[in-house]
Amino acid sequence: MIVTDILNPFHAQLAKGIQDAADRHGYTAFLFNSDENPAKERRALDTLRGHLPQGLIIVPTSGARQNLQALSGVPIVELDRMSGTPDVTTVTADNATGATAATRHLISLGHARIGMIVEQKDISTATQRHDAYRAALEDAGLTYDPALVLPGNHREDDGHRAALRLLTLPEHRRPTTLFVGNNEMTVGAVLAARALNLRIPGDLSIVGFDDSRWAQTMNPPLTVVAQPTYDLGTCAAEQLIAQLRHPRDGPPQHHQLSTTLIVRHSTSPPHAPAPAHSH
């Protein structure tokens, strides 16, 4: 299996789900880490080819569609994201429904300037979450403002940088809430808000994508779109093992697991600006 960042608790949980399921069926799962780098992903695939693997589970990078051409004849399951590689089984979460629920939750609280920090736009999860956010705004009659959407590269410091840029916009342009595309970038966004002395949720509401231990235990506990991370991993392993045992003709399968909006205490109605004093 190739994941993109084993230091990210989301990928660690995926890997644990895969390894546990493989173990139950008497298989061994070898783990490679691509760091979102297509060249590293390519090297991992080259290494694998030399070991005649029975199958591959991959969280694809932006270069995966090209890289996977080198691994013909091996059953492949794409996990979490889709590279567009034909004839490959995929196991993903319902990103669109999750992002729609998060955006609608913020709109229902009265927010109109909703900033989004989104993962790399050439990754399917980012595109799905961003498109659903945009559609939810437009459904509510709110204008989509591209200046309130900043890309990050999945890491904490990307979230920190993007949040600082959004939160230091002039007051009439500044978002009153941030919807952040993954758990690592959410940590960065929370730290940026603290560096600017913004109270959460008094001055700024935050919704993250991915639940985690720290999201539940931070002060205030974070409103998140939770994914069934461990189950995504076990489902991918079960799909691959089923293919190894009964090679299938017919179209590839696409499994989508549900996401859940968990409302905690990091979201509230927007803070009304102090009235101007008349003399």
Image (cartoon, helix red, strand yellow):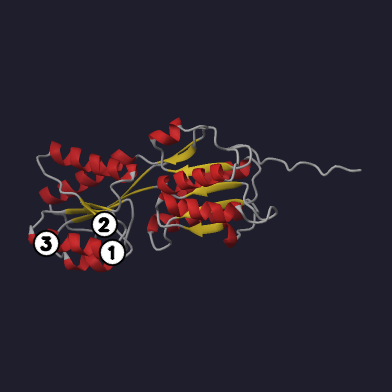
Q: Amino acid at mark 1?
A: Pro
Which residue is painted at 39% across and 33% down in the image?
213
Element type at marker 3? helix
Element type at marker 2? loop
- Residue furthest right as drawn: 279
Q: Is residue 178 visible?
A: yes
Which mark sits nearer the N-terminus, 3 or 2?
2
Mark 1 vs mark 3: give the one in front. 1
Element type at marker 1? helix
Q: Which residue is mark 1?
A: 38
Q: Nearer the viewer, residue 52 or 270?
A: 270
Q: How much space separates mark 3 and mark 2, taking CA atoms?
A: 16 Å
Q: Which residue is mark 3?
A: 49
Q: Amino acid at mark 2?
A: Ser
**As drawn, 65 above or below 253:** below
Mark 3 vs mark 2: give the one in front. 2
Q: Nearer the viewer, residue 11 or 231?
A: 11
* Residue 216 coordinates in the image, percent (x, y): 44, 32
Which mark sits nearer the N-terminus, 1 or 3?
1
* Residue 112 coordinates in the image, percent (x, y): 65, 49
Answer whether labels 2 and 1 touch (C-beta < 8 Å): yes
* Residue 246 coordinates in the image, percent (x, y): 12, 50
* Residue 207 coordinates in the image, percent (x, y): 51, 42
Q: Which residue is mark 2?
A: 34
Q: Is residue 27 left or right of residue 177?
A: left
